[in-house]
């Protein structure tokens, strides 16, 4: 059967009469005028290959991934086909634009054959942020830094809607690790409310993550490039690398999932541990949209959750936070089944939960929560949290003895030597969780 092909751009359409005269092995089914038309035609399953004129489209990793996911091979006519050099994008077949139609048809059919002989991508796996990239299975422990380069661990700090303290946990975990001598990268991937830069007092308008994604999208991203873009922050004798988030919420389309995947891959080589401050939303409905090329705001969060070795699910320790956590974890397990969440309750306080708040939370969780242990309880500590915010640094610098700092250090598996957890002796009114489980699962 002849291979259906779509062309884009004048130089490519000039080949159409020549290809038609051959009567196989390719058939031009459409000549497109612009990229949007080409992508739509590919997504409708019309073609198995596209032939692009030089400069007809910006060849980004995201575009190539999308076309591959539609089962389409990308052939580009080029002036420098023999040595495309720095412009070469992975997954693209370059053919000299001066080639004869028969040789072009031959190159297309060989590329299609090879593409189809390779392992097919997991098509239709709608749960994944970038369906072309299969996430690696998550590993078990939180910080195991003994691995070879390229084997750094990725910890995603995520949590339900609200402000349960994801950024606070991410910054302070990363700071504890860096101060303990672990090479650490902190990435702000919250596409709704990036705040790591502000919390650390960084006057960085460059939006490191967007910059890194832009370069990664052109192909050839490296750990050295990531090191150049990341800001270096001194923390108690240690060095923390920080990739700041988008400076304006409307810049979220710049954080493309495929490119972010490459950035995180480079992060594994650059740092022993990468801590990501994620957004909160998953919104599966958006994933089911027919317009699969439309950028998806939650794609970045999904990508992080897929790639992470460990997901820390941070929730508020009160009657609002617990049901939100139950709901969020149910969604997480459905949408990213490869993730291994660890439940962390933050802002634990007597006033919101009642006497012995940890026991109360444990009991409520055992009754209503999914079958997952609670990994940590982080106490509320307004004075310590505010002091750190004001100083634009981590708790270990402004409130090293605070119970909150100690609890986060323990969570990062680097407990300070003098770690001694303080417990509040205050007792206030006993606020109970709703007794009706249905309310908690709403
Ligand atoms: N354990 C805590 N005790 C007191 N205040 C906290 C604690 N954790 C976080 N906060 C404060 O709560 C607010 C929201 O925290 P943040 O980490 O920005 O949440 P998120 O990233 O989930 O939106 C911040 O002002 C922060 O200082
Ligand atoms: Mg935040």
Image (cartoon, grey):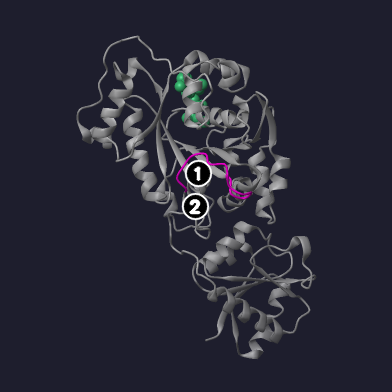
> Residue 336's x, y, as percent?
42, 50
Residue occupying the point 44% across, 52% down:
287
From what the image shows, is residue 7 above or below residue 193?
A: below
Neighbour class for label 2 at 10 Å: few (<14), some, many (≥20)?
many
Tell whether 179 sits left or right of 117.
right
Judge: label 2 CB < 8 Å from ligand 2.
Answer: no
Which circle marks residue 141 in the picture? Answer: none
Residue occupying the point 45% across, 45% down:
140
Range covered by the magenta-colored residues:
139-152
Which circle marks residue 301 in the picture? Answer: 1
Q: Is residue 342 visible?
A: yes
Q: Are marks 2 and 1 in contact (CB under 8 Å)?
A: yes
> Residue 240's x, y, as percent?
65, 32
> Residue 216's x, y, as percent?
66, 51
Q: Assign the C terminus to one quadrant of the image.
A: top left
From what the image shows, is residue 11 above or below residue 240?
A: below
Which circle marks residue 129 in the picture? Answer: 2
């Amino acid at each position: 059967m002849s291979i259906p092909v779509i062309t884009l751009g004048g130089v490519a359409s000039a080949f159409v009469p020549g290809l038609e005269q051959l009567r196989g092995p390719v058939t031009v089914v459409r000549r497109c005028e612009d990229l949007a038309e080409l992508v739509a035609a590919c997504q409708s399953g019309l073609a198995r290959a596209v032939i692009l004129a030089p400069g007809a489209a910006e060849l980004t990793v995201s575009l190539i991934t999308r076309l591959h996911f539609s089962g389409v091979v990308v052939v580009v006519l080029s002036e420098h086909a023999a040595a495309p050099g720095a412009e070469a994008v992975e997954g693209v077949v370059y053919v000299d634009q001066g080639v004869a139609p028969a040789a072009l048809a031959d190159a297309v059919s060989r590329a299609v054959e090879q593409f189809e002989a390779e392992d097919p991508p997991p098509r239709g796996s709608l749960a994944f942020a970038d369906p072309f990239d299969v996430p690696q299975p998550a590993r078990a422990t939180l910080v195991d830094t003994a691995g070879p380069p390229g084997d750094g661990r990725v910890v995603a700090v995520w949590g339900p809607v609200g402000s349960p303290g994801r950024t606070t946990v991410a910054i302070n975990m990363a700071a504890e690790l860096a101060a303990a001598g672990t090479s650490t990268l902190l990435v702000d991937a919250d596409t709704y409310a990036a705040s790591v830069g502000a919390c650390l007092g960084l006057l960085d308008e460059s939006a490191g993550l967007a910059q890194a994604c832009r370069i990664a999208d052109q192909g050839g991203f490296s750990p050295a490039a990531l090191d150049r873009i990341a800001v270096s922050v001194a923390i108690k004798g240690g060095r923390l690398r920080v990739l700041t988030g988008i400076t304006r919420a409307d810049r979220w389309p710049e954080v493309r999932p495929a490119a972010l995947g490459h950035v995180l891959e480079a992060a594994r080589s650059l740092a022993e541990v990468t801590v990501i401050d994620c957004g909160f939303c998953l919104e599966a409905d958006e994933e089911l949209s027919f317009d699969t090329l439309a950028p998806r705001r939650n794609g970045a969060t999904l990508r992080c959750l897929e790639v992470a070795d460990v997901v820390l699910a941070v929730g508020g320790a009160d009657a609002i936070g617990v049901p939100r956590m139950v709901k969020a974890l149910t969604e997480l397990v459905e949408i990213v089944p490869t993730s291994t969440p660890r439940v962390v309750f933050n802002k634990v306080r007597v006033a919101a939960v009642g006497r012995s708040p940890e026991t109360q939370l444990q009991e409520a969780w055992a009754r209503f929560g999914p079958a997952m242990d609670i990994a940590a309880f982080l106490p509320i500590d307004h004075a310590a949290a505010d002091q750190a915010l004001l100083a634009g640094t981590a708790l270990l610098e402004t409130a090293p003895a605070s119970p909150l700092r100690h609890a986060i250090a323990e969570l990062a598996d680097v407990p300070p030597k003098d770690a001694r957890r303080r417990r509040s002796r205050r007792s206030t009114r006993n606020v109970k969780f709703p007794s009706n489980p249905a309310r908690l699962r709403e």
